[in-house]
Image (spheres, helix red, strand yellow):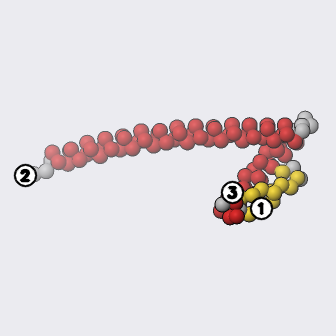
């Protein structure tokens, strides 16, 4: 299975890393690396001099927090959609009942 993996080069804080991934994963990996690099640069430019390890940990925590907030927002949105679907189903059922009651035999 490892034979279907390619090596992809990513750059984080001017350091290059070779990561094994499938061709299908390459675009996602490059996008994730760009996002991580951006976050690490933001933290580094915010002030304190931090080790690469600490920068990576803080960036990972920030990204995870953003993800969890988006995930919760999506869950809330999904719950609202379900609630609206129930309301629509009820309204349609009431309309169907009204239409049926007005039919001439």
Q: Name the spot of residue 7 as percent of width and height, x first.
A: 77, 61
Instruction: Give x and y (percent) for residue 101.
Output: 15, 45
> Residue sitting at 90 percent across and 35 percent down?
48
Residue visible at 74% across and 38% down in the picture? 62
Q: Could you tell me if residue 23 is visible in this image?
A: no
Q: Does residue 74 appear left or right of residue 13 in this picture?
A: left
User: Circles 2 and 3: CB distance less than 8 Å?
Assistant: no
Q: Are marks 1 and 2 in contact (CB under 8 Å)?
A: no
Q: Relative to residue 105, is residue 43 depicted above or below? A: above
Residue at mark 3: 28
Pinpoint residue 103: horizontal percent, then vertical percent: 13, 50
Task: Residue at 72% x, 41% y: name it.
Answer: 63
Q: Which residue is mark 1?
A: 7
Residue furthest toward the right? Answer: 49
Mark 2 or 3, closer to the camera? 3
Which label sits on residue 22? none
Q: Dot 1 lies on which element?
A: strand
Mark nearest the camera among 1 and 2 is 1
Q: CA distance from mark 1 to mark 3?
A: 14 Å
Comes first in the chain, label 1 or label 2: 1
Q: Is residue 101 left or right of residue 70?
A: left
Mark 2 vs 3, N-terminal side: 3
The residue lying toward the viewer, choosing from 18 and 32, is 18
Whole-angstrom CA distance, mark 2 to mark 3, is: 62 Å
């Amino acid at each position: 299975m490892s034979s279907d993996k390619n090596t992809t080069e990513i750059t984080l804080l001017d350091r290059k890393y070779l990561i094994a991934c499938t061709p299908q994963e390459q675009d996602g990996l490059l996008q994730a690396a760009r996002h991580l690099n951006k976050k690490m640069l933001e933290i580094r430019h915010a002030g304190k001099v931090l080790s690469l390890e600490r920068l990576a940990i803080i960036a990972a925590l920030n990204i995870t927090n953003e993800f969890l907030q988006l995930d919760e927002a999506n869950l809330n949105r999904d719950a609202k959609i379900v609630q609206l679907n129930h309301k629509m189903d009820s309204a349609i059922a009431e309309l169907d009942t009204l239409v049926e009651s007005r039919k001439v035999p």
